[in-house]
Amino acid sequence: MKILRKGLWILTLMALVLCACGPSQAELDSTATKVAADIFATQTAEAPTATFTPEPTDTPTPTELPPAAPALPGDVQIDTSGLTLTVEDFPPGFIELPPDQLGFDAEAISDENFVVMTTFAFANFEPLEIAFGFTQLLSTQDQFGVDLLIENSDMFLVGFVQGLDADVVSGPTELPPIEGLGDASVGLTLVAESEALDQVQIDIMIVRRGIIATYLFVLYPAGEQSIASIEEIAVLMDERMIAAAP
């Protein structure tokens, strides 16, 4: 699935940052862009592809869309200006990792069949924690595919981790459902590790609200409590999807 191919590189970056030992916040800030660029160049080509999305049909998909307001069938427009998270949405200590400097901006990872509207990434370094995500514009077919993905989200998350050449240590375990969150949603958590990767807790939430889907990830050292609550972040993004919906 395109989500794996397009999102795997940043998950790898976040894991590398989490595993870094010793560097100061200034050193981490100054090297983040270079690391991301190197990873992006390789991971987008090498990441595995899942099979949850049905085979493409002849349904036309938007092309050459302006990143601020992608066009929908019937000339429906979405105001994406508020369809994101800001550093003010996180506890003190988090900083923004500019998506355009990481090669993770919407235009860079979109194509004619996978329309990403907004992306965002944030980091706290003491203790280490990364939160990132993106929103996707959905055709009718895409809505079916996302709902199918939500129903099989444990397989999605395991495949995501295996794409890092890592092993699942425990989980995935489903997070308690949030009443009224999106038209469809799911939350999962697991612990992963590899030879190059210390044990990392990965929380993920997928939320679909109408023709918009949000994918959220929070990574932090296993055995620790996350600083940023993925549930609270998901509720915020659901409110913003409602506000942005046509």
Image: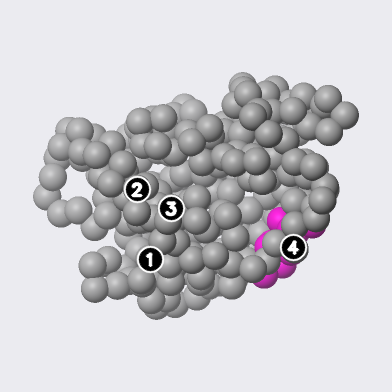
Tell me the distance, in whole angstroms, between the alpha carbons under discs 2 and 3: 7 Å
The residue labelled by disc 4 is 55
Q: Nearer the viewer, mark 1 or mark 2?
A: 2
Label 4 sits on what residue type? Glu
Tell me the distance, in whole angstroms, between the alpha carbons under discs 1 and 4: 26 Å
Q: Quadrant of the N terminus?
A: bottom right
Residue 47 percent location from the top left of the image:
44, 61
Residue 192 higher or lower than 34, as above or below: below
Mark 3 residue element = helix
Mark 1 residue element = loop
Residue 232 higher or lower than 203, as above or below: above
User: Magenta includes 7?
Assistant: no
Q: Which residues are magenta?
A: 144-152
Tell me the distance, in whole angstroms, between the alpha carbons under discs 1 and 3: 12 Å
Mark 4 residue element = loop
Residue 158 percent location from the top left of the image:
51, 71
Going from N to C along the chain, the mark reached first, 1 or 4, is: 4
User: Magenta includes 146?
Assistant: yes
Comparing 127 with 196, the one in front is 196
Label 1 sits on what residue type? Leu
The residue labelled by disc 2 is 41
State the image quarter where residue 61 is shown.
top right
